[in-house]
């Protein structure tokens, strides 16, 4: 950074959460259910997930949304 460069950043509110394995969620999430190669889309960076998936992941991680 310097020379007037200011990076664009998203304003994020972080929740207290714990790490959890994804395997128990695979059949329940919209972006993974029935997709044997579901991890492939993660190679390209950010992608949108449904609010339902967001809440399922948050619940599994013990967050209060």
Image (tube, grey):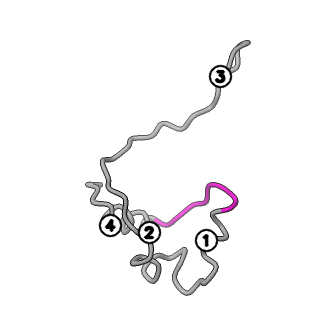
Q: How far apart are marks 1 and 2 (CA)?
A: 15 Å
Q: Name the residue under label 4.
A: 60
Residue depicted at 62% across the width and 32% down the height:
8
Q: How far apart are marks 3 and 1 (CA)?
A: 33 Å
Q: Earlier in the sequence, mark 1 or mark 2?
A: 1
Dot 1 lies on which element? helix
Q: Name the residue under label 1.
A: 39
Q: Is residue 61 above or below residue 32?
A: above
Q: Could you say which quadrant of the image residue 5 lies in?
A: top right
Q: How far apart are marks 4 and 3 (CA)?
A: 36 Å
Residue depicted at 51% across the width and 82% down the height:
33
Dot 3 lies on which element? loop
Marker disc for residue 55: none
Q: Mark 4 against mark 3, which lies toward the viewer? A: 4
Q: Mark 2 points at which residue?
A: 53
In the image, which residues are magenta? 43-50
Q: How far apart are marks 2 and 4 (CA)?
A: 11 Å
Crowding near pointer 1: few (<14 within 10 Å), some, many (20+)? Answer: few
Q: Do the residues labelled 3 and 2 touch (CB within 8 Å)?
A: no
Query: Is 30 one of the magenta-colored residues?
Result: no
Q: Is residue 51 left or right of residue 63?
A: right
Q: Mark 3 against mark 1, which lies toward the viewer? A: 1
Q: Which of marks 4 and 3 is nearer the N terminus?
A: 3
Q: Mark 2 against mark 4, which lies toward the viewer? A: 4
């Amino acid at each position: 950074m310097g020379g007037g460069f200011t990076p664009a950043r998203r304003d994020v509110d972080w929740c207290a959460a714990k790490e959890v394995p994804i395997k128990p969620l695979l059949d329940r999430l919209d972006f993974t259910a029935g997709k044997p190669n579901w991890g492939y889309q993660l190679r390209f960076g950010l992608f949108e997930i449904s609010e339902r998936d967001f809440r399922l992941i948050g619940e599994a991680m013990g967050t209060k949304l």
